[in-house]
Image (cartoon, rainbow, N blue to C red):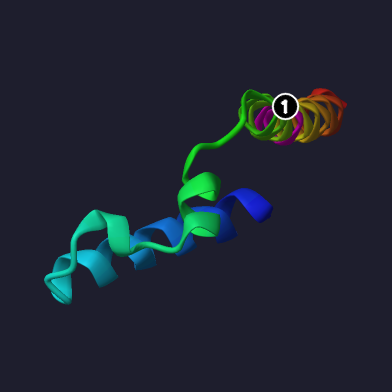
Amino acid sequence: MKYFQRRKKRKLYRQWVQRSSLPPDAIPRKEVAEDRIPQVDKQQSRLTILYILLGVAVVALCAGLILFIVYSS
């Protein structure tokens, strides 16, 4: 969830710079540092997506097995 919050914040600051006619240097330093996502966060978000897809696959497999058992009887 932190990934999406940081992404929203980066988008907000980009819009702020574009619409206020300010140079990109006007972004506060803390947000500039957050703009670069560390490699650990990228790996964590990929793992999260992988776990979600794995969960969906297990649920679909269970549903398929249940339907197979019900209709084969």
Q: Residue 6, located in which quarter of the rendered image? A: bottom right
Left or right relative to 43: residue 65: right
Q: Is residue 26 magenta?
A: no
Seen at 37% across and 67% down, the residue is: 12
Up-down relation of residue 40 to residue 25 (above or below): above
Q: Position of residue 69 (x, y in %)?
A: 86, 26
Up-down relation of residue 6 to residue 37 (above or below): below
Seen at 77% across and 25% down, the residue is: 61
| Viewer-nearest residue: 23 or 62 | 23
| Viewer-nearest residue: 31 or 37 | 31
Q: Residue 57, located in which quarter of the rendered image? A: top right
Q: The C terminus is located in which quarter?
A: top right
Q: Position of residue 64 (x, y in %)?
A: 74, 28
Q: Is residue 52 magenta?
A: yes
Left or right relative to 3: residue 23: left
Q: Amino acid at mark 1?
A: Leu
Q: Which residues are magenta?
A: 49-53
| Viewer-nearest residue: 26 or 10 | 26
Q: The N terminus is located in which quarter?
A: bottom right
Find numbered disc 1 in the image and state the secondary structure of the residue it sits on: helix
Q: Position of residue 19 (x, y in %)?
A: 15, 73
Main secondary structure type of the part rendered in magenta: helix
Residue at image mark 1: 47
Q: Position of residue 22 (x, y in %)?
A: 18, 68
Left or right relative to 19: residue 66: right
Disc 1 crowd rating (10 Å Cα; few below 14, some 14-19, many 20+) is: few
Seen at 82% across and 25% down, the residue is: 65
Up-down relation of residue 50 to residue 48 (above or below): above
